Amino acid sequence: MGASAEASSEDSARIALGSVAPAAPSRRLLGRAIALGAPLVYLAALAAVIVSWGLPLAHDQLFLWVLLGLAAFSVPGWRSWGLMLLAWLPWLGLLVVYDELRAAVSVAPGDAYVGAQIGLDKVLGAGAIPTVWLQDHLWSAGHLHWYDYGVWAVYMTHFFVVWLVAAMLWRADRARFARYALVTVVLTLSAFLVYWLYPAQPPWLAADAGRIGAVERVVPLVWDHIGLTSVRSVYDNGDLVNTVAAMPSLHAAYPMMLLLVFWDAGRRVRIGLALYTLAMGYTLVYSGEHFVTDILAGWAMAALASAAVAVAFRAAGRLRAGAALGAPMRSAP
């Protein structure tokens, strides 16, 4: 009877396992389907928003879609979403504060500085203002050339490239993400400090005041011709625009920051980012958004911010190494 009971229990176990076993592959298939489907749903929703309401370029809108994208492409690692929020939300909060402060330090356009930029640009342009010279030779009022659309496209990358790179680093290299995030914060806040101390007119505003020759704002004209719109910010109704926050140019500083952060990523990456940096500089000058002086100031500030963060990380590394060496000595009897 003992052998019969043992056989019966084994048969029952096999029957139970047989009824449970198919559930595991089903769960795995469901997990794969969600992992593959979530990015597709995300991309479809983003496309629908762009078509219906416009590009999400405001900081809050852009961060929302970056975080949703990070979540959608990391569904199998959903347990890390809380850590992701802790790392990203303070960054968003800081940039919201930056937007508010930048608007708060705005001055009347007539009170902003422009003489030094005009003088230096004339030196760099052999007596001519580079923006005025470029538009005299390349810009045609009422007729957009192919390169005008290219200038618009390069200009628009400013609004999302930095944050898309941050998202990719968050997934691929957390150590580099930490350094990258700190450089971005230091650079952005340093630019705000200069905006406060040295409000500066861009070329188009100086032209409106009669300080230099005629200058058109190319990017808004192309934008209007294309017919695209952008999603309005939740907290910014347009009052936070600071038209005299031109020195330094963050549009120019961010590409230089990318070049310096990824300097060790290989020759092809360096060449690509160097070309992007130069393309953005040309775009800003030709489109009437910045003087060459603003571009050079942005590049210099990016270099200083990158160097300062590199020094800080090396100092922190030495402190950690010293603490690690000292720990066994302190614990010794």
Image (spheres, rainbow, N blue to C red):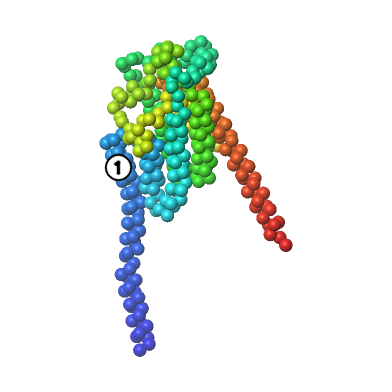
Does residue 55 appear anywhere in the picture? no
Q: Is residue 241 visible?
A: yes
In the displayed structure image, the side of residue 236 where residue 227 appears, left or right: left
Quadrant holding the C terminus: bottom right
Residue shown at the point (49%, 18%) measured from the top left: 114
Amino acid type for the residue under numbered disc 1: Ala
Q: Residue furthest top?
A: 127
Which of the 4 image quarters holds residue 312?
top right
Image x and y of residue 242, in percent: 42, 27
Residue at which label 1 appears = 44
- Mark 1, other Cα within 10 Å: few <14 / some 14–19 / many ≥20: few
Q: Going by the picture, which residue comes out furthest to the right?
A: 333
Screen quadrant of the N terminus: bottom left
Instruction: Name, please, the residue furthest toward the left.
Output: 52
Q: Residue at x 33, y 73 (%)?
A: 16
- Does residue 215 appear left or right of residue 26 in this picture? right
Where is residue 211? Give x, y as percent: 45, 13
Question: 102 or 145, which lies in front?
Answer: 102
Q: Secondary structure at mark 1?
A: helix
